[in-house]
Image: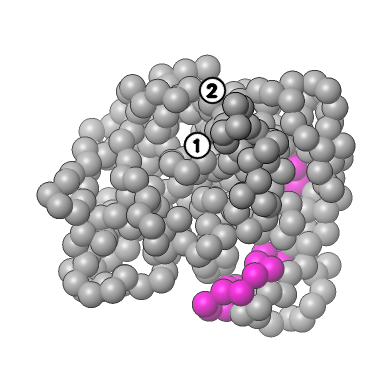
Amino acid sequence: EDEGSVGGWTPIYKQPSGEEDSTACTGGTSATCSNTGSTYVDRSLTYHSATGKMSGTITTNQCPDHDTDHRPDRECITQTLPDPAFSTGALDAAPLLKRVGMALRTGGDIFGPLVAGFEDGEICDGGECESGVDIASCAAHLEATCQGELSPKVLVDACGGRESPYRFHKGMECLYDASDWSSHSAAVGVALDGYLIYGKWEGSQGGSAESPVLDACNGHTGVVPSSIYHEAGPEAVYHYHTSATPPFIIGCFGPAPSMAACRDIYPGCHNDEFKADIELSEGGHLEYMKWCTCFQHLGSTEGANPYAQPSSNTT
């Protein structure tokens, strides 16, 4: 579904170039994963504390390590990090419908917030979702327009992913203790530019959970904790966090100096051909720019793409 496009054409975007097929994965040769997890992952990574970046490779069969409703596709690959296409360290557009990172525990794909869309009848009768819309706004539109129940295909599971092949779009809360906001959340993934991705908490302040203030790419600079995957240094380094609202994990490869800078690297943020009116429940509408993953910058939504708040069954 993510290879096509529903309701218009897909703008050209930079593709990753660091993936190779591998024969190293063990645990069976089936073309599909088991429902209860059949994960193979081999991490050969070095953390550079001065820059906050990982380098090396991850080999994985892309199978999740938790129960799933279906049997996701299994494919053994090796991904080089940083990906050669995104290794400069400069602000860059992230792939719109491709891998933007990998989960450290499972090697599973991490995608950005957008989906390729769903045709009428694919998810439900009477509802469709255009391509280039974030997954929460797509689900909100389908909930408002569908006749009957939605197919689980559009809904992310408790880990924030869906299949097939399995990919994380948001949350990733089964990969760390999201209930513990007493300190900085643990590392859960690595982006294709080499920077690490952490859970949603910055720590606590005054006895309350503190969410990080993030740039348009969903990252910021600060001191990070060590993990079983890396030994952090005392340096403040750039890194990403997951978030409850779009872009959820990664909106671009940062750092991003401004909302305008993020919008400038995505043609969809400026092209009127990508304007869409998205119907929501109770007569609500979104004047949405498809293929634009710039949703906020440093807590401000001024000049940003609007979005629907995720409903309770899409978190």
Outermost residue toward the left in this view: 283
Name the secondary structure under disc 2: loop
Residue annotated with mark 2: 256
Expressed as whole percent of the image width and height from the top left, the position of residue 169 reads 51, 52
Based on the picture, tell me whether residue 63 belongs to the magenta stretch: yes
Q: Amino acid at mark 2?
A: Ala
Residue 251: mark? 1
| Most frequent secondary structure within the magenta stretch | loop
The residue closer to the viewer here, 313 or 33, is 313
Expressed as whole percent of the image width and height from the top left, the position of residue 29 reads 74, 81
Asked if marks 1 and 2 touch (Cβ < 8 Å), the reply is yes
Whole-number angstrom distance, CA of label 1 to CA of label 2: 10 Å
Residue 261 visible in the snapshot:
no
The quarter in which the C terminus is drawn is bottom left
Q: Count neighbours of disc 1 (C-alpha within 10 A) and say few if under 14, some if 14 to 19, many if 20 or more.
A: many
Residue at 37% x, 41% y is 291
Q: Amino acid at mark 1?
A: Gly
Residue at 31% x, 36% y is 306
In this picture, is 135 found above or below 148?
above
Left or right position of 80 against 14: right
Point out the tag, 1 or 2, that comes first from the N-terminus: 1
Expressed as whole percent of the image width and height from the top left, the position of residue 147 reads 19, 72
Residue at 41% x, 19% y is 260
Outermost residue toward the front in this view: 207
Left or right position of 88 against 269: right
Left or right position of 285 against 157: left
Q: Which residues are magenta?
A: 61-83
